[in-house]
Every structure is written in structure tokens, then in C-alpha cells.
Image (cartoon, rainbow, N blue to C red):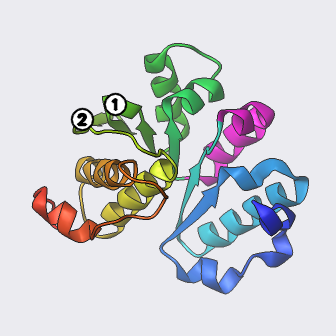
Amino acid sequence: LGASTEFAASDVDARAVAAGEWLYLEGYLFDKPAAKTAFIHASEVAKSAGRKVAITMSDVFCVDRHRESFVHLIRTHCDLVFANEAELLAIYETSDFDTAVRQIRSDSQIAAITRSSKGSVIVSGGDTWVAPVAPAHVTDATGAGDQYAAGVLYGITHGLSLQDAAVLGNLCAGEVIGHIGPRPAVNLRELATAAGLKV
């Protein structure tokens, strides 16, 4: 995290936020009061400019420390929530995946949930899409969640359906776990095109 732990509302570039189609909030930065204020400020700037807000839960321990604040932020400021299964269960303090999905469905316009070898699930309104994953050898899981979110957001902002956006997210995450390091080792557009996605 480094210097980003000192992130505050005064560091938010309102013009950049207002100019973007989506604002992406990283849950790891939510630990300090100043960062919470910055999240709310940036989200309000985005909303006032007619933009969308996405947040990633980032870590179960982070969710446990800030559960009430996260739920409030999701309900009042976010359009899209990224979480893995463990984080989703932690948010709603349940061990039942379906129960947690019902809750996030009512709290957020869109939720994208990764489930490791079970693939990912995207819910929006009354709709649910499951995107399976191809079997893969996991060398290093670093960056998998970030790549998944990047693929989903790219898909959404480039006209893909939510289901195809989830497939793209899975492809991106699947590529990065196959080698050491969080950056893709191949051209992701070529990988997506080979899988039949129109990107």
C-alpha cells in the first residue's frame, strides 16, 4: 500500500473523476478515516457528474474491520461490487453463498463474485450469469482479482453483455495465475478473440 495509506479527500482529482466513465475504488485503501472520507467524496463527485462507481472488497480482514461502512457505501454510492466468495460471505456474516447473493442483489445494481475453480457469478436485478473457468495450473495467484475486475470493467465499457464481461474477466484472471507476477504475459485481446469474444 505504501504512501496510498495517506490518501485523503484533498488528493482526489475531481476533474479526472468527473471525466471518467467509471470510478474504481480499491477496498485496501479503506482502512483510515481520511481514506473513507476520500472514498465518499470521490463517489459523490462521480455521481454528480453522472458517472458509475465500482468497488472491490479486496480482503476478508478488511471487510471484517469495516463491515458496516462497506455495506453503507455499497448501498448508497456504488453501482458495481467486486468480491470473492469469502469476502461476500464475510460482508453479510453468513456461510451460505445463496443467502449472501440475495443480499448483495438487493444492495447493489451489479455484483461480480469470483469463486476460484467454480468460475464467477454476476448478478444484476433478478438476473444471474455464471461464467465457468477452464482448468488451470495455479503458479501465482497474485493479481488474479485485479485482472478479473479489469476484464469485467473493460467488457462493460466496451459493449459486452454482463455474461461476456464475466467470461473476459475469467480469461484475464486465468492467464495471470499461470505464471509468476501480476502482469499478463500474453496479449489479452488476442486471448479474448480466440475465445470468441468481440473485443
Tell me the quarter of the image containing the N terminus.
Answer: bottom right
- Residue 33 lies left or right of residue 15; in this view the side is right
- Residue 119 lies left or right of residue 55; in this view the side is left
**Crowd class of label 1 (few under 14; some 14 to 19; many from 20; radius 10 Å):** few
Residue underneath mark 1: 117
The structure residue drawn at horizontal position 42% and vertical position 37%, both measured from the top left corner, is 114
Q: Is residue 128 above or below residue 98?
A: below
- Residue 166 lies left or right of residue 140; in this view the side is left
The structure residue drawn at horizontal position 67% and vertical position 63%, both measured from the top left corner, is 43
Does the magenta segment cover residue 62? yes
Which x, y percent locates residue 63?
70, 35
Residue underneath mark 2: 135
Pointers 1 and 2 in contact (C-beta within 8 Å): yes
Query: 167 or 173, which is in the foreground?
Result: 173
Inspect the image, locate mark 1, and give the three-letter code of the amino acid beneath it: Ser
Q: Is residue 153 above or below residue 128?
A: below
Task: Give the structural element (helix, strand or loop) at label 1.
Answer: helix
Which residue is the extreme one toward the bottom? 15
The structure residue drawn at horizontal position 55% and vertical position 27%, both measured from the top left corner, is 86
Real-space CA distance between mark 1 and mark 2, rounded to the nearest whole angstrom: 7 Å
Q: Which residues are magenta?
A: 60-78
- Residue 79 lies left or right of residue 166; in this view the side is right
Tell me the quarter of the image containing the C terminus.
Answer: bottom left
User: Disc number at residue 150?
Assistant: none
The structure residue drawn at horizontal position 46% and vertical position 27%, both measured from the top left corner, is 101
Report whether residue 199 is seen. no
**Crowd class of label 2 (few under 14; some 14 to 19; many from 20; radius 10 Å):** few
Q: Which is more N-terminal, label 2 or label 1? A: 1
Does the magenta segment cover residue 33? no
